[in-house]
Image (cartoon, rainbow, N blue to C red):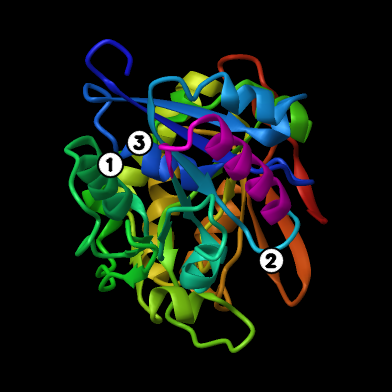
Amino acid sequence: MSGSRIKVVLYNPRAVFFTMPLALLAIGSELDPALYEVVTVDGRLEADPVGAVLAQLDGALCLGVTVLTGAPISDALEISRTAKRARPGLTVVWGGWHPSMFSRECLDERSVDVTVRGQGEETFLEIMQRLAAGRSLEGCAGCTVRLSDGSVLENPPRALAPVDRFRAHDYALIPVERYFKLKGKRQLDFISSQGCNFRCAFCSDPFVYGRKWVGLEPVRMVLRLRELWDRYGFDDVNFQDETFFTKRDRVETLANHIIESGMKFTDACRPGRSPAGRGLAALQAIGTATIAGGRRIRFQRSAQTHPQGHSHRAGIRDR
């Protein structure tokens, strides 16, 4: 506890890339700051991740860990096991791509108590509310839980909610400038949608989101980007959407609003479908990098300078 607020610790495992932990921003931002104290620890930023987490566990209601399939699992396990040894009664919740696909299997690990499947904002909030009230997680949609008798209960799935319903991501929960430094550029990671309508057999999206897609309304996106641009002075945005071009009209509207806003930055996205027509032309106008045909192409405008003094590149080139 911090005063009357409930403390929740969120952890991002070590990895070899420095994308901002948007999954933790999503669930952490959905917790009302008047009621919850959210502490985010990123193992990639810490010389001693275990020590950094242990230093925050006193009085915490929960440790939430986002887990990507692959090497980050080892670090997630170390952190979870260490936390459980230090605080046996602490609830450890795993979310992210790996537990979304292997919710029951993750609970074979005794240091993990709950797994969140798919979209986590509403599910994690309900988990926190139930834990704070001392209530069981039986019936909490969207999560799988180990019950007090050791059995595993897979609760019903939670419907994919419109992302416009959620609070804006609070970037104050992470040290933005440290990510800029590690990336070697003032690149802001941003996500504007969840899910994917396609059925690619090699991808986990169809399994996790059921081929459904939800996205932010363009005007809200631009207003939020403007707030963040004024605050952090970024000169590049890396849109982390799985399929940015799901709705071409939405992308065109976004691009036009960015132009009208006066913001000057380049950006990158994964189209998911072939960008073409007016949507592509609008994105070229704002300076967009897309990934198509295995080739990363960056369209860049004439050099501009941000009010805070950050310069922008010029020209068109392949990356």
Amino acid at the residue labelled 2: Ile
Element at label 1: helix
Which quadrant of the structure image shows residue 312? top right
Query: What residue is at 47 percent from the left and 80 percent from the top?
Result: 207
**Label 2 or label 1, whichever comes before in sequence order:** 1
Above or below, 316 relative to 242: above
Which quadrant of the structure image shows residue 225? top left
Query: What residue is at 75 percent from the left and 40 percent from the top?
Result: 314
* Observer-nearest of 132 and 228: 132
Magenta stretch prevailing secondary structure: helix
Residue beneath disc 3: 29
Residue beneath disc 2: 291
**Label 2 or label 3, whichever comes before in sequence order:** 3
Range covered by the magenta-colored residues: 72-91
Residue 312 appearing in the image: no
> CA separation, marks 2 and 1?
38 Å
* Observer-nearest of 184 and 219: 184
* Residue furthest top in the image: 3
Q: Is residue 88 magenta?
A: yes
Q: Given this view, does label 1 or label 3 mark the residue nearer the observer?
A: 1
Element at label 3: helix
Which quadrant of the structure image shows residue 51? top right
**Label 1 or label 3, whichever comes before in sequence order:** 3
